[in-house]
Structure formats: C-alpha cells, structure tokens
Image (tube, rainbow, N blue to C red):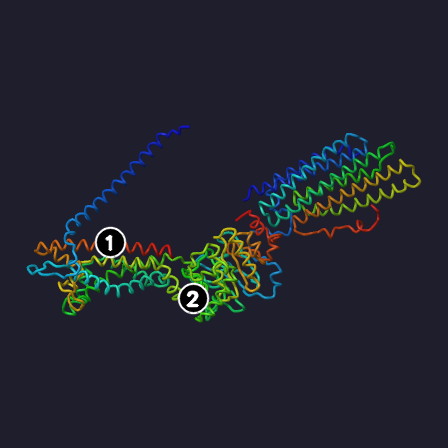
C-alpha cells in the first residue's frame, strides 16, 4: 500500500545514510590529517563538506514535500519530522570535521612534537558513535541508540583529560607552543561536539521508534556545570 | 495520418450499421401500422363528430334527429369510473402501502401479492361474471353498482402494484431519518414516504383509470348498458364502451357509423389521459 | 597510527552494511521489528483503551460487552467503549469493520432490520437502552442522527427542521419559528436560507442540505449527535464547513462520528476508536492515536499500510 510513499521514506533514509557515511569519512580524514600530517586529507574533507551540504538541502526539500503531499501520521510522521533534526546533526558533524582541519593547520605549523594518543582514541570513539547512531536509525534499534548515549560520557572524560594535560603545557610556554596547545584543545572540543551530535541522533532515533522523548533524561550534568570552560 | 481499419473492425462496423437499419425499419413498420389504424379510424369516424354527438343521447332510428349522440355513454363511463375509484383507489393504495412498508414483518404479504397478481391477470369477463353473481342476482336487475364494483376489482390490483413499486422506490434514507427523529412507523409513512412519492402514485392511479375506461366485457354482465341518460346506479347503467359494442353489432348503418365515432372519441379520451399522466409525473419529478 | 589503516576499510564497510539493511528490510519506518512495546499478536483479546478515556469523568454512553448478530453473522464482537460527554468521538476502520453498525445500535436504528439480535448492552445516561420496557421513540428523540447522503424530506426547509418538534406534538407557531431559526443558525445555514424557509429543502446544494439535516437533528434538542460519514458525499469546501460546525457544536452536544477519512478523524475528534472485523481494537485520545498508537495494527491502518 502507498508504494510511492514508502519509496519516498526509503529515499530519505538512504540519503541520510549517505550523508552520514560522508561525515564519518570526514572525521576519519581530519584525524588522520592531524596524526600523520597528511595535507591531502584537508582537501578531501573540504570536498566532502560540499557534498554533505548539498545532501542536507536535498533531504530537507524531500521532507517538506513528503509532509505536504503525503500527510504522514504516527511512526511515519515521527520519522519524517525527526529526519530533519538528524540531517542537521549530521551536517553539523561535517562542520566540526572542517573545524578540526582548520585547527590542525595551527597545530602543524612548525612544531613536530607527538600528538596525544588520546586524540586517536577520541576519534575512533566518536566515529563509532556516529556509525552506531545511524545504524540504530536504519535498524530501529533502541538498545544500540542507548549505548551511544552512554558512550558520550567517555568522550566527555577524554576531552577533560586532554584539557588538563595540555593546560600544563601553557605554563610559561612560548607563542608557538601555546598556539599549538590551544588549537589541540579546540580540536578536542570539536570531537566532543561530534559526540554530542551523535547522541542527539540517538535520542531522535529513540523518539522515532518509541515515541518517547528522552532528551531530558540523558542530558549530562557535566555539560552544564563548568568542568571545562569550553 | 490515415487510420486504416482492420478487416475485423470493418466487419463490426458493417454489422453495427445493419443492426441500426433493422431497428429503424421495424420502428417504421410499427409507426406505419399505428398510423394506418388511427388514420382509418379518423377516416371512418370523423364524419360523425359533431356537437350533437356529445350533447344528445341515442335517438331511435326512424325518429327525427336519429341517430343522435352518445352523451349517455360518455356520462355513464365517467360516473362508473368515479364510483369504481372511490372503492378501488383507497383499497388499492392501502394494499400497496401494506405490501411495501409492512411486508417484511408479515406473513400475509406473500399471499396478498400473489392474489393481487392473479387478479390482475384474470380476464375481465370473469370479473364481470363475478360482479353478476355478487350484485346483479341479489338485486334482481342489472345495475350500475355492479358495474362499478367490477371495474373496482380490475382497478385494485393495478393500483396496489404500482403503489407498492413506487413506494419501494422512495429511498430508505427518508424512512431512517424520520425514525431517527423519533417518529412512529405510521407517521413516517403518512407524512414522509407517501408524500414523497405523490407524483408516481398519481401516475399509478391514472393508469388504472385509463385501463378501466376501456373495459367492455365486465360491464356487459353488470351494468348492461342503457340508452337512457341516467344517474341512478340501481338501474342498468350506460357506458361508452358498451354503447359502442351495441351499435357496432346492431343492424343500422347510422348506428354503426356512430360506433366508429365513439371508438375515436374513446381512444382520444385515453390518449388525453395518458398525456395527462406523463405531464403530472414529469412535473412531480422535477418539483419533488 | 592505528587510525591510518583502519580508516578507509571501516568507512566502506559501515556504508555498505547500512545500505544493505535499508534494502532488505520491509518498509522501514512502518514495521517495528526490534521494539518491545508493540503487540504483534494477530489474535485479539481486549481493547487497548488509553488511560485518558477512563480519566474522563462523565460518560454519556457506555457500550458494555456488546455483540450484534445479523441472523447468523456476528457483526460486533463484545465491544466495550465509553463515550465521554461533550466531546467528539470518532470511529474509524476499514469497510465492514462494524463502525456504522455500532453507531446505529446506539439509537436502536438497527431494530428496523430483520433478524437482528444483540447481546450485552448499551447504556445511555445509565439506562439500558435494550431493556424491555424502554420507550424507543423517546430514546431516539434524545439522539439526533445525520446520515451519509444528505436526506432532507421533500418538504419546505421550515417543515424539515420542525418535523421532530411536530412529532412531539408542538403546534404553536411562534415556538416552532423560534426553534427553527435557532437550529438553522446553529447549523450555520441561516444567512443562506432565511429568505426562503418555505421553499423546498431539495433545492439546496449538497453541503447546504447536509447542514439542513444537522439543523433538523438538533432542533429537537438531543443530547447526542450520531453522524454516519456525514461528509463523504460532499465536496471539500462543504466538508470543511460541516467540520467547523462540528467544532462549534461540541461541548453542548456529545458527538459520535463514523468516518473513513483518517484526516477528518484527526482534524475533528477528541477521541478516536479503531475498529476491525467487528472489534474495537484501540481507543484513545486522537492525538495519541495519530502520533504514537499503542498497537501495530492501529499504526498499520492509519499509516495506510492496510485497509
């Protein structure tokens, strides 16, 4: 029944997945660019970002059209409305990856010191979070979504750890070292924001599947109080 | 671009054409026959049409003014129809209402409908004999009452069946709406169902009247016919149809000619009645 | 360093596996394979009634374990339903699910059909309407009914509207006129017919005729309005006028509306009951039913996946 409508819903989901895949790649490229100092990574990220933004527009247009023409209700309605949010979150993930690339430029100027292993770990975790959140959307798996929400704590902890470690570097440091440390702190912030967005997607998935709004339940207090001023 | 027909299509087209031609031809035949009949009647009967036909009763051959007119017959037919209707229409309509509105709940409906159909199919001469036994023998002489009763017997099944059919055509939604407003069944029938079918019911009545206006056989055994203009139903009663019959089978040529004129007038009357039926039913349809 | 080797392969794998998921699963957003709070059971035991219905304090009609038989065929199976007073309750479901039958049982219009037998009961204001001594005529006067096809009587507009009153024995001209005006105004039809109250009701357009039927139904001041697909024979503008009318009438009247148009049920009603094969499957506030129904069957129906 309503084959063309089902087709439209599938297409929206496919495009979101496509966009998500691109965003994941962008994060991986950005991290690799940071860790291996590969300049080509930055170019790939910028190219992908254009594609991500284009998909964002396409998906939003499809969402409005589906609402107008098909008048979805119940689960379909929740899916269509929330897809708009998911798409925004994915687009912002892309933005954050671009920010990482931009901050990396300042990190790589001059100093060739080692990058904290924490970054590689953080990068892996947030990529996994994004992948899991999108997989949860496709398979309608609330347990997987809840796992993503729990993982966020780890990401926050890593960000805080990086901050503490790099703060030490700032004491009496020269201009370049300070610039480098601050940029790394900003990158950790970017990665943490990516984790936030992945969590948002997971919350949206739970709403789509169960009709439960879990946003208040999973909002972490550590975001609100000032462990780090970032 | 030329559209070429396939052989099969050509064959179908020709077949269509042939059928159409046949239909037209047969229609023409029917119209021709009708035209011939009416034409013949006109030719034979029109000569007798005069004012005296309508204003004078029969005058015996041999006396001045013969053969006179058929005023008695015309008036007689009208009176008989009126009398028959006073019994035939109410009984027929009530039977029709019963069959239409109450039939699902009653075991009586089936038998009533059956009897009605049988009665409708009975040859009218049999009805005449019935009338003879019921009203001529006890009263001792042929009389107008018996004639009216015989005609009523013919009218009742017609009115009953048409009433039933027309009431069945009234959409059930009217009945439901009325009941839903808290009306009783009787009130619903009286105030909603019957009024909404008025036009068609009138048509049914007029059909019955047109039918009995042309009946001869039953009247032969009941009203017998009379040369006098009388309004007393206790006596033998005149009617146009019987009058025509008697003139046509009589010995005098002038009367035979008058019979033709009578037939013409009778047909004309029925024709007018049919037109009136159509007019009434059409106007009721549009007005609702 | 660990990232470099993993990055490309991981990206492709995730994408591919996700893509495969989309194409192999059934309509993704409708079917809910993994969640636990959807009852997939095809057999039906009890109506899923949302708690909000029970929280309503005043139920003007209660359907209790109600079953209806058309001679041998069971059309309604043990329906349990409580209609809240002053609200609009919609009955939806595929053709033949029994929603019209249930509606017509409420004013015992099904009595007109031969061979109808009922079990269980329906209570109107606490009284069993199938009790042997009950005056059906009086019951029907307290309920107004509007049908699918507008059916004004072949009488003048005025006679149509006061028909119910005249049945009740009301003869006083001024009373009839006053109530007629009030009812027609209540049906949002006054401006269009005030100058031709004595012309035939059949001369109005479809939408006007239906509003005339509504005026006729409310003239006798019923407590409940039963509407059987009132807009299905009307064009969209007439439909929207009737829907606006329903909106103004509720509160004063309790309205039960049967509709096959999901959007209409969503627009117009406070509570919605979903029926299927003679059973009430789910019943709750319209917003809940349309945002997040409890049962998969309900969801499948309202999203158009079956029925």
- Above or below, A191 against C39 in this view is above
Residue at the far left in the pictured view: B62
Q: Do the residues labelled 1 and 2 touch (CB within 8 Å)?
A: no
At x 36% / y 59%, what residue is drawn?
Answer: B197
Task: Give me the chain letter of mark 2.
Answer: B
Residue C209 pos. (x, y %):
46, 57
Q: Is residue C116 visible?
A: no
Q: Which of marks 1 and 2 is in front?
A: 1
Q: Are marks 1 and 2 on the same chain?
A: yes
Residue C34 pos. (x, y %):
64, 47
Which is nearer the N-term, disc 1 or disc 2? 2
- Above or below, B178 against A21 in this view is below
At x 30% / y 54%, what residue is drawn?
Answer: B278
Q: Is residue C302 visible?
A: yes
Q: Which mark is residue B271?
A: 1
Q: What element carries label 1?
A: helix
Task: Give me the chain letter of mark 1.
Answer: B
Residue A36 pos. (x, y %):
81, 32
Instruction: Between residue B279 and residue A197, name the one nearer to us.
Output: B279
Instruction: Between residue C244 and residue C230, name the one nearer to us.
Output: C244
- Above or below, B134 against A122 in this view is below
At x 24% / y 42%, what residue is drawn?
Answer: B28
At x 17% / y 57%, what residue is drawn?
Answer: B51
Q: Residues within 10 Å of mark 2 (few under 14, many from 20)?
A: many
Instruction: Between residue B151 and residue C219, name the one nearer to us.
Output: C219
Q: How crowded is mark 1: few (under 14 residues within 10 Å), some or many (20 or more)?
A: few
Instruction: Between residue C203 and residue C75, name the one nearer to us.
Output: C203
Q: Residue B183 carries which label?
A: 2
Q: What element carries label 2?
A: loop
Residue C187 pos. (x, y %):
51, 60
């Amino acid at each position: 029944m309503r084959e063309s409508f089902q087709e439209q819903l599938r297409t929206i989901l496919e495009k979101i997945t496509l966009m998500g895949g691109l965003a994941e790649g962008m994060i991986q490229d950005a991290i690799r660019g940071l860790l291996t100092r590969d300049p080509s990574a930055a170019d790939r990220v910028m190219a992908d970002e254009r594609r991500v933004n284009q998909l964002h527009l396409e998906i939003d247009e499809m969402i409005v059209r589906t609402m107008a023409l098909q008048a979805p209700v119940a689960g379909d309605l929740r899916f269509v409305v929330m897809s708009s949010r998911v798409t925004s979150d994915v687009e912002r993930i892309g933005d954050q990856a671009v920010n990482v690339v931009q901050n990396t430029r300042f990190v790589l100027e001059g100093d060739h010191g080692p990058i904290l292993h924490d970054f590689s770990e953080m990068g892996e975790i947030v990529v996994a979070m994004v992948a899991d959140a999108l997989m949860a959307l496709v398979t309608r798996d609330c347990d997987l979504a809840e796992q993503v929400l729990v993982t966020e704590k780890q990401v926050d902890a890593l960000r805080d750890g990086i901050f503490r470690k790099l703060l030490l570097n700032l004491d009496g440091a020269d201009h370049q070292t300070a610039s480098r440390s601050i940029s790394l702190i900003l990158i950790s912030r970017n990665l943490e924001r990516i984790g936030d967005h992945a969590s948002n997607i997971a919350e949206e998935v739970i709403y789509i599947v169960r009709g439960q709004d879990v946003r208040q339940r999973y909002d972490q207090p550590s975001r609100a109080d000032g462990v780090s001023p970032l | 671009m030329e559209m070429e027909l396939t052989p099969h299509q050509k064959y179908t087209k020709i077949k269509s054409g042939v059928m159409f031609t046949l239909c037209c031809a047969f229609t023409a035949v029917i119209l021709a026959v009708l035209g011939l009949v009416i034409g013949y009647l006109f030719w034979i009967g029109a000569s007798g049409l005069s004012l005296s036909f309508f204003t004078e009763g029969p005058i015996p051959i041999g006396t001045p003014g013969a053969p006179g007119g058929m005023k008695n017959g015309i008036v007689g037919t009208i009176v008989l129809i009126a009398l028959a209707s006073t019994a035939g229409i109410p009984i027929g309509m009530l039977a029709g209402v019963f069959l239409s509105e109450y039939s699902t709940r009653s075991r009586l409906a089936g038998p009533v409908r059956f009897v009605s159909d049988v009665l409708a199919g009975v040859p009218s001469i049999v009805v005449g004999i019935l009338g003879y036994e019921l009203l001529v023998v006890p009263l001792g002489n042929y009389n107008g009452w018996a004639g009216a009763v015989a005609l009523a017997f013919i009218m009742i099944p017609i009115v009953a069946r048409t009433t039933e059919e027309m009431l069945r055509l009234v959409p059930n939604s009217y009945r439901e709406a009325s009941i839903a407003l808290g009306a009783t069944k009787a009130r619903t029938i009286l105030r909603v169902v019957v009024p909404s079918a008025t036009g068609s019911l009138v048509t049914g009545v007029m059909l019955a009247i047109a039918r009995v206006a042309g009946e001869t056989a039953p009247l032969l055994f009941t009203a017998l016919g009379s040369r006098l203009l009388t309004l007393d139903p206790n006596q033998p009663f005149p009617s146009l149809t019987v009058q025509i019959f008697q003139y046509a089978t009589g010995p005098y040529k002038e009367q035979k000619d008058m019979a033709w004129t009578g037939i013409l007038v009778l047909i004309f009357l029925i024709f007018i009645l049919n037109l009136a039926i159509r007019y009434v039913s059409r106007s009721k349809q549009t007005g609702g | 360093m660990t990232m470099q080797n993993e990055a490309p392969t991981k990206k492709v794998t995730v994408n591919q596996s996700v893509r495969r998921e989309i194409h192999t699963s059934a309509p993704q957003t409708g079917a809910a394979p993994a969640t636990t709070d959807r009852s997939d059971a095809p057999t039906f035991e009890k109506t899923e009634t949302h708690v909000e219905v029970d929280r309503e304090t005043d139920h003007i009609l209660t359907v209790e374990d109600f079953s209806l038989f058309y001679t041998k065929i069971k059309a309604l199976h043990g329906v349990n339903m409580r209609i809240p007073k002053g609200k609009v309750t919609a009955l939806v479901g595929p053709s033949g699910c029994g929603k019209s039958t249930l509606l017509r049982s409420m004013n015992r219009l099904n009595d007109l059909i031969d061979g109808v037998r009922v079990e269980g009961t329906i209570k109107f204001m606490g009284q069993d309407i199938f009790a042997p001594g009950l005056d059906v005529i009086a019951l029907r006067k307290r309920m107004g009914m509007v049908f699918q096809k507008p059916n004004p009587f072949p009488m003048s507009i005025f006679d149509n509207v006061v028909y119910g009153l005249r049945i009740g024995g009301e003869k006083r001209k001024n009373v009839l006129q006053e109530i007629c005006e009030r009812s027609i105004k209540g049906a949002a039809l006054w401006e269009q017919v005030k100058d031709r109250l004595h012309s035939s009701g059949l001369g109005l357009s479809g939408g006007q005729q239906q509003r005339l039927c509504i005026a006729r139904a409310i003239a006798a001041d019923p407590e409940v309005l039963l509407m059987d697909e009132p807009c299905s024979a009307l064009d969209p503008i007439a439909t929207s006028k009737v829907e606006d009318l329903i909106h103004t009438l509720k509160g004063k009247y309790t309205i039960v509306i049967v509709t096959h148009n999901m959007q209409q049920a969503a627009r117009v009603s406070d509570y919605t009951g979903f029926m299927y094969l003679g059973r009430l499957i789910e019943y709750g506030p319209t917003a809940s039913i349309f945002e997040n129904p409890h049962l998969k069957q309900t969801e499948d129906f309202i999203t158009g996946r079956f029925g």
